[in-house]
């Protein structure tokens, strides 16, 4: 075997434990191997009822060595055609075995007045740590000990084989990420391994991104990091900001903060579907002539826009169309030249349709084509907006962008929606669910990407969720885990179980094979822009108003 980890001296008992086709490496437990890029030996594969196999490997860890769930290790395998083969495996869990500390021994030591001591790991023959790992990829090294290529596993690890820290090069290759931050989206590092960058390819945004997590878990912080990275690549961004968390960062990125209905930011009625309009008009009962008349009138105007007869239309245009459409639908009274619209249907429909004038954001179309230039960041501040109006805003913006993207009138653009469970619930009747389903399904073909964020994945539309192919999963309540089935990719059960307990700013990164090959723990990097979603310091606010410390309460009895 052409050894990538050359012999550096004797090691006791190696000869008896090595398989026949694996040479004794003799790497001292305290040394790194410079020929292997500084990768550190951390243990040996052991044989038991489950290990080694193509699906599971357990290895005894050397004293003083460390690994943790989500970390990658490299396991030596047989040489092939003069090249060294290493299996790349993801650590799932680590356990300690110590017979001196079983329940009976521990109880006995506490009960008897005799001091006891025993040798610790490294000196003891019965105390050790055992790591469980899942083989994921196979790395082929070149003559220089550097990575040549990655391939699917075809080699089973053998008992006694040495286990090494995979290091940055092999870990990044196994995950299918970029090698340096300048090549992709610099999101941070592998949790617990600050030397291993996590840099998804910039193209992952074309296949849509999901960010999930509970309150205060760091999901809006991660969204801000993504905003910085996309801006650095010149990707235009339109963000529906439900809680005002991106206002300051948008300004720092040179973008625009817009409030619906203010400073000229309005959206045309022609950007809404007939179903959207019916939902927005109060007291239009489903299945009635009024609903039929309103839908048909809106559809007629939409066809005129599609045929180039008009650029857009507003509330007054729709009200005027209702009377004309009453004739087409034969909602009339009288006959011949005396035929008139049925006022019992037409007038209530017109009156209720005029109620759309109460919505300040309906008006002239916004000039997206002029605004969405490379590097543009447009933040639509919807703070405090009622859910019904929020859904109309999202539906209108999404359909405008969808239409412009189909016409190639704008460059590739990302539409981002915070708290998207509010606007795309698992309900076919919601005004935004249908358009977001369409964008999630085929948006990448006409240059439109999605970034959707929520704290409540159990409430979102499943067909949208499963099409968001890169996922940042922060700490979340256990009752939400079932809703995330299907987006964990190959994350182990141990990794999934760790989700509710992840520290702030750490998430499980998963994806489809073409975006992120294997799940890993990500420590999100520090933001350069201001984080607007931090939990407010309410007690600092009270201190500023004169109540700076805890005060003792004196009951009326004590006062007397």
Image (cartoon, grey):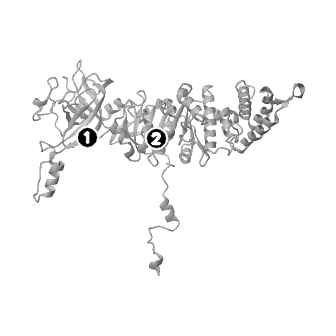
Q: Nearer the viewer, residue 432 or 244?
A: 432
Q: Callout 2 environment at 10 Å: few (<14), some (14 to 19), or many (20+)?
A: many
**Residue at which label 1 appears:** 94
Q: Quadrant of the N terminus?
A: top left
Q: What residue appears at the point 36 percent right and 36 percent down from the top-left corner? A: 520
Residue 326 visible in this rendered orientation of the protein: yes
Q: Position of residue 182 (x, y in %)?
A: 43, 34
The residue at the point 35 percent across, 32 percent down is 172
Report whether 446 appears left or right of 336: left
* Residue 144 in view (yes/no): no
Depth check: give the residue in front, 174 or 217: 217
Measure how far apart labels 2 and 1 are at the Cα level: 27 Å
Q: Does the CB distance between marks 2 and 1 fall below 8 Å?
A: no
Label 2 sits on a secondary structure element that is strand
x and y, in percent, of residue 88 in the image: 29, 30
In the picture as drawn, the residue positioned furthest to the right comes out as: 337
Q: Is residue 255 depicted above or below 462 in this figure?
A: below
Q: Percent x, y for residue 389? A: 64, 43
- Label 1 SS: strand
> Circle 2 is placed at which residue position?
212
Question: Residue lying furthest top in this view?
Answer: 81
**Of the residues under marks 2 and 1, which one precedes in the sequence?**
1
């Amino acid at each position: 075997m052409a050894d990538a980890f050359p012999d550096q001296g004797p090691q006791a008992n190696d000869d008896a434990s090595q398989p026949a086709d694996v040479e004794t490496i003799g790497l001292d437990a305290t040394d790194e191997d410079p020929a292997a890029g500084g990768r550190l030996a951390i243990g040996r594969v052991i044989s038991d009822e489950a290990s080694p196999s193509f699906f599971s490997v357990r290895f005894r860890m050397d004293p003083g060595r460390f690994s943790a769930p989500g970390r990658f290790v490299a396991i030596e395998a047989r040489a092939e055609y003069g090249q060294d083969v290493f299996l790349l495996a993801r650590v799932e869990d680590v356990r300690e075995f110590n017979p001196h500390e079983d329940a009976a021994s521990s109880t006995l030591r506490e009960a008897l007045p005799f001091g006891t001591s025993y040798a610790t790991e490294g000196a003891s023959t019965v105390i050790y740590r055992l790591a469980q790992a899942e083989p994921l990829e196979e790395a082929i090294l070149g003559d220089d000990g550097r990575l040549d290529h990655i391939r699917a596993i075809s080699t089973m690890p053998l008992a006694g084989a040495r286990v090494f820290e995979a290091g940055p090069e092999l870990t990044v290759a196994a995950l299918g990420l970029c090698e340096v931050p300048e090549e992709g989206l610099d999101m941070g590092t592998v949790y617990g391994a600050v030397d291993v960058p996590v840099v998804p390819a910039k193209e992952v945004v074309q296949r849509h991104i999901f960010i999930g997590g509970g309150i205060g878990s760091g999901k809006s912080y991660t969204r801000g990091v993504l905003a910085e990275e996309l801006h650095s690549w010149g990707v235009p961004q339109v963000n529906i900001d439900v809680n005002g968390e991106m206002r300051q960062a948008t300004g720092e990125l040179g973008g625009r903060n817009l409030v619906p209905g203010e400073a000229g930011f309005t959206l045309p009625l022609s950007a809404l579907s007939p179903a959207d309009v019916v939902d927005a008009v109060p007291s239009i009962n489903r299945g009635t002539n009024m609903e039929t008349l309103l839908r048909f009138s809106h559809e007629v105007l939409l066809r005129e826009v599609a045929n180039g007869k008009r650029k857009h239309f507003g509330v007054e245009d729709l009200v005027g169309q209702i009377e004309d459409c009453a004739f087409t639908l034969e909602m009339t009274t009288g006959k011949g030249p005396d035929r008139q619209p049925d006022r019992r249907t037409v007038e209530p429909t017109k009156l209720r349709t005029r109620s759309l004038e109460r919505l300040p954001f309906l008006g002239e179309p916004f000039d997206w084509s002029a605004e969405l230039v490379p590097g543009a960041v447009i933040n639509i501040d919807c703070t405090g907006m009622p859910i019904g109006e929020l859904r109309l805003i999202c539906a209108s913006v999404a359909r405008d962008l969808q239409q412009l993207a189909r016409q190639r009138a704008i460059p590739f653009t990302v539409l981002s929606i915070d708290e998207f469970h509010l606007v795309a619930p698992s309900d076919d009747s919601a005004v935004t669910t249908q358009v977001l389903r369409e964008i999630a399904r085929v948006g990448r073909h006409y240059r439109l990407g999605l970034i959707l964020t929520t704290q409540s994945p159990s409430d979102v539309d499943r067909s949208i969720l499963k099409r968001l192919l890169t996922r940042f999963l922060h700490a979340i309540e256990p009752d939400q885990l079932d809703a995330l089935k299907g987006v964990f990719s190959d994350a182990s059960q141990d990794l999934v179980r760790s989700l509710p307990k992840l520290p702030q700013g750490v998430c499980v990164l998963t994806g489809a094979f073409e975006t992120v090959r294997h799940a890993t723990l990500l420590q999100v990097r520090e933001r350069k822009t201001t984080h607007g979603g931090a939990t407010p310091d309410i007690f600092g606010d009270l201190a500023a108003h004169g109540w700076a410390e805890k005060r003792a309460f004196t009951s009326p009895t004590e006062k007397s």
